[in-house]
Amino acid sequence: MTLKNLPAAPVGRPSALSNRDLPSAAMEKWDGNIRAAKPEEGSISIFDVIGADYWGDGVTASRIAGALRSLGGSDVTVNVNSPGGDMFEGLAIYNLLREYEGKVTVKVLGLAASAASIIAMAGDDIQIGRGAFLMIHNCWVYAAGNRHDLAQLAADMEPFDKAMADIYSARTGLSMEEVGAMMDGETYIGGSDAVDKGFANRLLSADEIADDDDSPSAALRKLDALLAKTDTPRSERRKLLKALTGSTPGATADQDGMPGATNEINPDNLKQLESALAAFRK
């Protein structure tokens, strides 16, 4: 089996699963500052949550499709540092990379959790930082309703969990039972362990990863993570960040998927806000 013959991911989404967010544990472990030390020509960066919200933020399949079209079939490097997000959008991005005619190299620089871990599996070559992590788990959503609604929701989620397990199993050679147990346990897989278990081909060298981004965009990512740790819903976090930047819905986001107009923000002010939020959590 070649990597291009990995299982296709299911498309579409059950309507009952449209309401989703990230587990707070994933945001706890995400350091949004981590970047490639020397971005390569022909590279795509996935440095935000997966999927778009009302405000147009996040990494979407349409954005990745556009980037791949612009490369015209030439080899591509996909740099990943994401806490995950919309599993269905992640499956769509996985399919795009899996079907891409050029060689796909995935570099997990910091965290590839949840939907981002599925995207990583589409690489012909998967490389991971020694201090980086993959996180795999079952489909995770907020839900409300009576027992019949919840029973139907569980039934709707099951085939998507199986599809993800199929992908992990095909990529690694691990049995479905072993992968299923890892997903049930919401498992974090460190760099060396990822190589040993077949989730990655090799470790990245330390000089390929940088984590010293002090830009306004980096500060906004830190604030987003801090707000998530206080269990602030993603939609509310985005509203607060948009208010801070002065952006409006539909405003152009930067290449990392963060709100626009960040060039006008004083990083010192953002650092003060970070400190205040951190003190609030203590």
Image: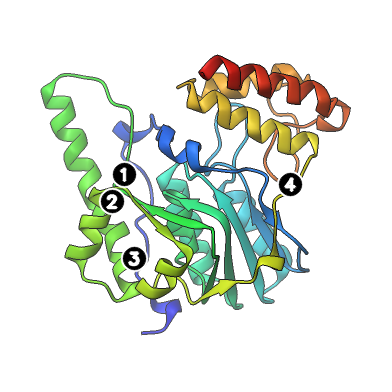
Residue, disc 3: 167
- Residue marked by disc 2: 160
Dividing the image into 4 quarters, which one contains the N terminus?
A: bottom left
What is the secondary structure assignment of the residue under circle 4? Answer: loop
Above-or-below relation of 154 to 7: above
* Residue position marked by numbered label 1 in the rendering: 139
Res 253 seen here: no
Report the mark closest to the observer, 2 or 4: 4
Picture disc at residue 26: none
| Residue 220: x %, y % from top left | 70, 31
Picture quarter containing residue 213? top right
Q: How crowded is mark 3: few (under 14 residues within 10 Å), some or many (20 or more)?
A: many
**Callout 1, which amino acid?**
Cys
Amino acid type of the residue that numbered disc 2 sits on in the rendered structure: Phe
Q: Which badge, 1 or 3, comes first in the chain's sequence?
A: 1
Element on which disc 1 rests? loop
